[in-house]
Image (tube, rainbow, N blue to C red):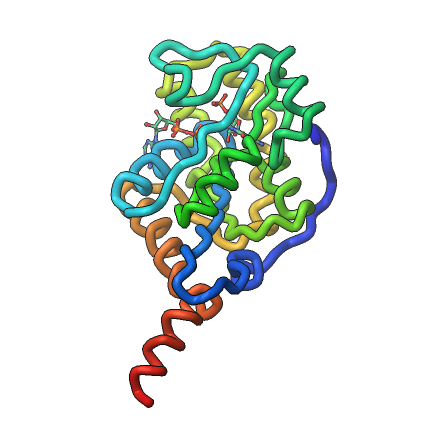
Amino acid sequence: MSSDDDRGRQRAGSAAAPAPHPPGARRRGLLFIVSAPSGAGKTTLVERLVEQTPDLTMSRSYTSRPPRGGETDGVDYNFVSRHRFEAMVRDGEFLEWASLYGNLYGTCAADTENLLSAGRDVVLVIDVQGARKGRAAGVPTCTVFVMPPTFAILEQRLRGRSKDSEAEIQRRLQVARDEVAAFSEYDFVIVNDEVTSAVDRLHSIVVAERARLQRMHDEAETIVRTFS
Ligand code: ADP
Ligand code: 5GP
């Protein structure tokens, strides 16, 4: 899954629509995908978003990348060896996965399914390739692309984060040049100029998706019945 040129775009409405469910059954959660070039601030925004949004969970990815200082296994990522990650790929355990900056990153299909079937809405913070794979697999999603205000600001943020070597920063900036061009494949675009305002816009998207007709249909029918 490491390379892909599928540029199919999916509308939020059809994408986020859950399957009909029997009255009284637990409503299936919605799946959101947030992508952005590394350093644009997607983790910062989504962490704030889930803090202020009930029933919304950020998915924890698997990666073969070693933990950075301050990162904890089972919190920031599930850190696994490349060997273990490749075995999981062979066993079909990933909903999507990608090879980035020499490391492997992926979303566990079973973890995601457990959350969705328990009625939790889930956000995947994944790269452009992973989002394409999700769409190509027909996974219903609402997708959001986060952009830095400019290239120079992206560079400042990557440096300010002080987590990567200079070579790594240069590599991420190079990849970012391709990634930003993918914005038009997404349902929504957020420019991360100021954190609070960008989180508010992300929150509005979640609220709007939750109010879509297909999601609200059964509850609305129940209300209609009280009129008869
Ligand atoms: P990503 O997850 O996209 O790689 P991060 O969330 O780690 O990016 O953010 C990169 C750096 O930019 C962090 O140091 C973060 O604190 C900072 N940052 C994020 N959003 C903003 C913003 N709107 N204004 C200024 N700095 C920001
Ligand atoms: P980092 O090494 O900075 O934590 O992440 C590098 C990139 O990997 C980011 O663009 C991040 O969104 C992406 N990423 C993290 N987890 C996943 C995942 O599960 N799948 C995919 N496709 N990308 C991921």
> Measuring 54% from the left and 25% from the top, which residue is drawn there?
173
Q: Position of residue 128 (x, y in %)?
A: 59, 37
Above or below, 48 against 219 in this view is above
Residue 60: quarter of image: top left
How many marks the image carries: the answer is: 0
- Residue at figure coordinates x 51%, y 52% from the top left: 142
Q: Nearer the viewer, residue 225 or 83?
A: 225
Q: Position of residue 92 (x, y in %)?
A: 67, 30
Residue 23, picture quadrant: bottom left
Instruction: Pick whichever, 27 or 156, lies toward us.
Output: 27
Judge left or right: residue 57 versus residue 98: left
Residue sitting at x 45%, y 22%: 77
Q: Is residue 196 left or right of residue 2?
A: left
Give the quarter of the image for residue 161: top left
Front residue of 126 and 147 = 126
Find residue 215 and report its horizontal and vertical position in percent. Answer: 44, 64
Q: Is residue 227 above or below residue 12?
A: below
Left or right: 83 as drawn, with respect to 151: right
Quarter placement of the C terminus: bottom left
Instruction: Measuring from the top left, give residue 166's x and y in whole percent.
Output: 49, 11
Task: Tell me the quadrant of the picture where the N terminus can be found.
Answer: top right
Relative height, residue 157 to residue 30 (above, below): above
